[in-house]
Amino acid sequence: MLLSGADVHACETLETCTAQYSEVAVGGLGITKTEGDLARKVQSYGPEAIPFLIELLEDENQGVRQLAGYTIRDIDGLGPEHLDALIRARQNGDGWIPPAIARIGTIEAIEFLVSDLRNDPSTHTQVTHAFEILGENGAPYVAELYACPDDCNERVFDAASFVLNEIGEDAVAVIPRLLEIAKDHKFALASRQYAIIGIGQIGTRAEAFVPELVALSKNEPLLAAYVDSSLVNIGSSEAVSALLLALPYDAEYVLSDIKGLGENGYEAGPAVVAYLKDLNWDIRVNAADALGHIGYTPAASALADALTDEDDWKLVYAASLALARLSAEDFVAALEHVRETHWYPPVSDMAESALRNIQSGTPLAESEWWQINTVDDSPKSCDAIAEDSLDEPDGTKYYTATDEAKLQQLAYDSAIYSYGAPEGTEPNENGIIEVTDDNMVEFVKQIQQVPDLALKVSDGWLVGADRGEWGGELVHVSADGNSTVLYEGNIEDIFKVGDQLVAISGLAHMFSNNGDLLQINETEPGEFSVVPWKRLPAAPMSSWLIEGGDLLINTYDGGSVIVSKIGTFRMAECVSK
């Protein structure tokens, strides 16, 4: 019978605790709570426990060996005399051992870990964690992984770059060696290109080497793109020119890079300001955020204009943050107006935080992940609201729960797209199948989609599907059965609100939580187009019409909101059921 956590804590001596390994160990990829409790108990004995654990590393039970490896990886007192036993355990497949080898820290230990990384160049593993432990002592050995004259494995370069990023600024001493590799034509081109990438992974302390990188870019065009990428990661002002060239082609991504330059990105300011008017709402938000981070004070007036946006609360939130970062004292009145009048409480709160920051230097209350998720202290959705619901006219709306057979008549062709490693890819030592830029492939599955809901229109039906992380779409199915995709994205519902047609879209998945209202326009009889109308506080959870013809939307972790027939928002009044 397996022991409980209480039994583990009850063991009174090192001998009785290590004797429990055969009863507690269950094997598998992870460590159970009881296994973890026992490991921490044994670790508390420090160096005294090492001989017992070394012996358990040779146990015939694979689960016992695994638990012993997990325990010894974080224990104090390991020395060169233990290296051979740890290497044997690693060679026998123990995935937890590399950090223990790193703690020994001898040349022999580091060289073994380098060989391990070369043989299995994966990231986010115990081996890469081992190099993080080694820090500056391991960095020179990692740098030599780039020194490949021919027949190079680019996955090794990827792993080396990942490790240098984990070590960070402690690896600055290897930059001269990486530059030597980058300049030396005896090494493969990929080797030289990735050595430049490795320099960027070290971060801001590589700034002193920027002139050499720039000269290398000018002299050797095949290295130029890699130098540009490295300059971005270093945060150098020399990255601005390349980023401005790329900005029109991938604005959302490049704006984030410009933001990362901080004040070194100031010269990009005039170009970034133009994106406050972009048709893509997320690009507008990223532009406002970037302007604050690069300290581009001439943008203050344009950011103040963004505070008046009635459709996108997140742009107002971003502009408030940016004005605070610019110490924009001339626009205090505009921020006060947002604080007093904005319909969404977190935006009012941010305006207040921005005002305090400008007026007294109080730190900004900025949420994490707000660009792609909700903000901190967002309102909760209501269990019930004060207004009564409003029934839609009979025969104009179908839902799966009540009209499945009718919805099957409106099925349309669609596809599910997914991305991953090719079939047959082996998992790494942690049981994870790694997906990289080099091995990622697209999978397409053709399906016949039965919609989740349908709204009757002048020519047929507007139908919507929500497949969660696998996507969805808004489709017009005409009276003669032809289907036209109007919008790709999950559709929670479709309504006629006043004189306009509105679809509710969004997705809450992992770190992302976003929702939108879409305006559907009949451009010609039987032909429809879709444009963004309003940004929701979060992904939609449920919705219905309420008395007066307004629309209630309950969101995931963003509150319950009501949009009127003319498009104004207000928070719903929650009541007890």
Image (cartoon, helix red, strand yellow):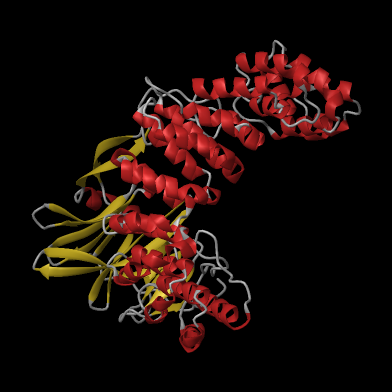
Q: Residue at x 48, y 77 (%)?
A: 323
Task: State the image coordinates of residue 5 (x, y, percent, origin top left).
Answer: 78, 34
Q: Residue at x 18, y 69 (%)?
A: 521
Does 469 sit left or right of 329 as displayed? Answer: left
Above-or-below relation of 502 to 452? below
Does 439 sit left or right of 462 as displayed? Answer: right
Instruction: Look at the image and tell me whether residue 100 can be seen.
Output: yes
Q: Residue at x 41, y 63 (%)?
A: 542
Task: State the image coordinates of residue 251 (x, y, percent, origin top left).
Answer: 32, 59
Above-or-below relation of 141 to 385? above
Task: State the image coordinates of residue 243 (x, y, percent, origin top left).
Answer: 34, 56
The image quadrant where one finds the N terminus is: top right
Does 148 sit left or right of 7 as displayed? Answer: left
Give residue 104's quadrant in the image: top right
Who is closer to the viewer here, 174 or 554? 174
Who is closer to the viewer here, 431 or 504? 431
Who is closer to the viewer here, 454 or 47? 47
Above-or-below relation of 334 to 377? below
Task: State the image coordinates of residue 199 (x, y, percent, origin top left).
Answer: 48, 41
